[in-house]
Image: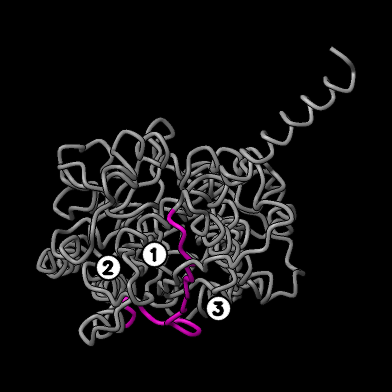
Amino acid sequence: MTKQKISFIGFIILFLLIVAWYITGCPLVDKCPFVRFEQEEAPKVILTFVGPADNASDWTAIFSKFNTYKKRPENGFLDVTIKYERICDPICNPGDYEDIVRERQYEDEGPNIFMVQNSWLSLQKNKDRVLPAPKEIMNLVKFENTFARVTKNDLTDKDGNIYALPFYIDTLALYYDNDAFLNENLIKPPADWDEFKEYAEQLTIFDKNGDIIRSGAAFGGGSNVNRSQDILMLLVMQNNISNERAKNLVSFNNKGSSAAVNFYTDFTNPARKVYTWNDDQMYSIDAFTQKKAVMMVNYSHHIENVINKTGNNLNFKIAPIPQLDKNNKVNYASYWVPVVPKKAFCGKAAKTSANCYSLAWEFLNFAAKKENAKLYLDSTKKPAANLELAKEQFTDFNDQRSVFAGQIFTARSWEHPDDSLSDRILVKMIDSIITTDEKNKESVYKAMTAAARYIDGLN
């Protein structure tokens, strides 16, 4: 066979292969070259997403990635726009936020996704409002292997239903003025509550009349201590950790809880050596940022608050929260999670078969994947709920979330269905104890009993 015939046969074979490639849609490339055609537009779907705190920019990167993902034919060929709205500006209490969401649902303008606090889903009356994750999206085994332990108690039920996927978990940690520490030759933060008491005593300064000039710790108060109710509940849980038979760790009907309340309020009792705070002190965050208090207990989102209030001129550090038992660590978990409600408006183009409920859950599953959740966490500077991401944050000592990320592994929570009301009850209990003239066991027990009766009535 001549070279000309071989070349001709080769040309024919190449031509047939090219024709076959065009006929099959030009695999391995986005579109066939040299061919002009009208590309079909993906049907549009709009999902609404509301929350009390995040900014829309915190979610933008994930929204964009999900839209690109869904436009592919193999992923549904949909043009999905997700609109995030921050309802509380700049802030509102959880009760007001929940009322706004309920009102929108009642008027058939409810969001496709909305944020709830972790404690809300532990009660059946709130679970009845939202749709659990489809089994093909997330199962309990995968959930437990992916997220911190506390989320199983908060976000799942005994039947294996999963009502939310967590992105972050915040915990209480110890903020301290490092310059004040060094001035008193204190090199390390207190590791337990006994050391915390010693530090508070040493760091508190009184004038000649016995009035507090500088508090060793913004600790022990009610209304003038930020999240005093959470600090108290942390102490209650740490004192009750050995009693795992209880449904949760916050029963006031035991010695552990009484010891926790007495320990906390002793810091406001002038008759105690540890006296370092009273109801005349300014708000705890202001006291700390103005160097009127050396230590305070707070969440990670107050890092930015402290920096802004001080112009980044306060040399402060953050340490793990002191523990009662180092072999049974307990940290206090507080976080918000996105859920898919049973009742929501579905904004989609005519003749689009997309199911907004399924699409909302598909988005949440997509967003909660490690590489996507990291986009949200880096934007908000929050500690991760994902175990792998939390470990990465914890081992990066240059990351301001390191301490908080390390605490999610031993974080716990408690059931309080009406956060606003239970918060007020607990703060009122603390205030009543520290302002009473009779600071004794009977007055503490009376205040605790009243608070327990009200909180139990919320369930």
Spatial distance from mark 3 to mark 2, Cα to Cα?
22 Å
Q: Quadrant of the C terminus?
A: bottom left
The answer to which of marks 3 and 2 sits earlier in the sequence is 3
Residue occupying image coordinates x 31% and y 33%: 141
Q: Which residue is mark 2?
A: 439
Spatial distance from mark 1 to mark 2, Cα to Cα?
9 Å
SS assignment at label 2: loop
- Residue 136's x, y, as percent? 30, 42
Evaluate if marks 1 and 2 touch, with contact meaning CB atoms under 8 Å apart: yes
| Residue projecting furthest to the top | 1
Q: Which residue is mark 3?
A: 209
For residue 51, side relative to residue 154 (left or right):
right
Q: Nearer the viewer, residue 195 or 427?
A: 427
For residue 385, side relative to residue 239 (left or right):
right
For residue 21, side relative to residue 152 (left or right):
right
Q: Can I make out residue 12 in this image?
A: yes
- Residue 381's x, y, as percent? 60, 59
Q: Which residues are magenta?
A: 76-97
Q: Can I make out residue 171 in this image?
A: no
On screen, 443 above or below 179?
A: below
Disc marking residue 365: none
- Examine the image and state in which quarter residue 308 appears: bottom right
Q: Quadrant of the N terminus?
A: top right
**Dot in front, 3 or 2:** 2
Neighbor class of circle 2 (other Cα within 10 Å; few <14, some 14-19, many 20+) is: some
Q: Which residue is mark 1?
A: 271
Looking at numbered disc 1 in the image, what kind of residue is underneath it?
Ala
Q: Nearer the viewer, residue 328 or 180?
A: 328
- Examine the image and state in which quarter residue 339 appears: bottom left
Residue occupying image coordinates x 60% and y 52%: 401
- Residue 124's x, y, as percent? 14, 59
